[in-house]
Amino acid sequence: MPWIKPPIFFFALVICLACRPRVKPIELPFHVDYGAYGLDFSSDFYATGIGSTGATDIFEASGGVAVSGMPQGLWTINDSGDSSNIYLVNALTGKTLLRLALTGLSAVDWEDLAHHTDSTGQRWLVVADMGDNNAIRSSVQLYAFHEPTWAGLDTTGGWTSHVPAGLKTWDLVYPGGARDAEALFMDPLTGQPCIITKREARNELHMLAASPSGGLDSTTFIGSFPFSSSTAADCAAIAGHGMPIIVKSYQHIWLWERSDDMSVVEAMIQTPVRLPYTQESQGEALWWTLDGGYATLSESPMGMPAQVWVHDRK
């Protein structure tokens, strides 16, 4: 049986949570209850536009990340049915600027795309190959690599083979057996992958160590939420707004406010608010924009181009 690295970061998490005084310690795994589908809406955002990718090869968009240095830029991927490809899109005009065929990565069922900036300022993209509709995969993978440098490349929509720099892989398993998951975000504070599962009546939060072990890495079950069918998530450091966390299902988007010194757990045990959301045809991509707004991207409805919905912060 493959060796499974103990989740050492769990002890660091406990120590971190104990650093600041609190009235009541947080017990893990947490179990929060609220009426998730009837929560108040945030009034801090407004719809600013809708775009269309216009790209026939972006047929099942399953993740999105804002592009460094390109305010309207979007990195996106397809889920099962595509190869290990990533697309650079102008989210407003819908024009596909760059198609990168990534070498060294497998593509079973890519379900989300996340990002993280490390202590050196290097920005990473993280592909979540963790789709598992029937919960039968023996392990699933996260692939992290340096964000591709698009400046200087041909951005007329052609194909380019790309060797991901700094590639590292988590080969992960869940305690208690396989899970289907489509929502991943990286903690900007610690660099830890945070996974929210999909199929359970109460979706679960799982976390991993910030660096893979080289063997099998077991997630730590952190807590559960009173909602289901999570399809995407994001967390980003936004100037003046801390590190807010957003999670979407097929019908709702939830927002957890988070200050700069607050852990993921401290934020997510709180009751979130909902964000305005225009119903999409199987929307599975959600991301924070560079200016602190948020956007969603749908799968292609009945062969039509996928749509991008943008909400800016007031």
Image (cartoon, rainbow, N blue to C red):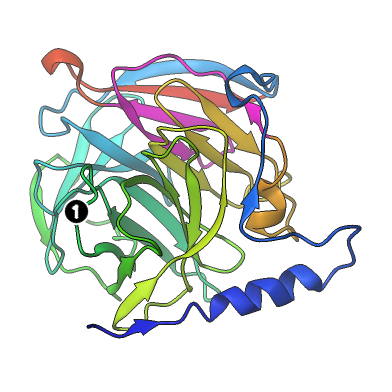
Q: Give percent across and percent down for residue 278.
A: 45, 14
Residue 148 located within the stretch drawn in magenta: no
| Nearer to us in this view, 112 or 35 | 35
Mark 1 crowd level (few <14, some 14–19, many ≥20, 10 Å Cα): few
Q: Position of residue 242 (x, y in %)?
A: 70, 49
Report x, y in % for residue 251: 44, 20
Q: Residue at x 13, y 69 (%)?
A: 104
Furthest-front residue in this view: 176
Which quadrant is the N terminus positioned in?
bottom left
Quarter that holds the C terminus: top right
- Residue range corresponding to the magenta coloring: 272-298
Residue 256 x, y percent position in the rendering:
65, 40
Q: Is residue 244 above or below residue 176?
A: above
Residue ID for mark 1: 136
- Is residue 284 found inside the magenta-colored segment of the image? yes
- Helix, strand or loop status at disc 1: loop
Q: Is residue 205 visible?
A: yes
In the image, residue 178 sits, relative to residue 62, either above or below, namely: below
Total marks in image = 1
For image coordinates 50% across by 23% down, the residue present is 252
Left or right, 62 with respect to 244, comes to left
Quadrant in the picture for residue 53:
top left
Specify the amino acid type for callout 1. Answer: Ile
Q: Is residue 60 above or below residue 148?
A: above
Relative to 197, 22 lies left or right: right
- Residue 46 sits in quarter: top right
Kindly tell me whether residue 150 is visible in this rendering.
Answer: no
Judged left or right of residue 276, residue 92 is: left
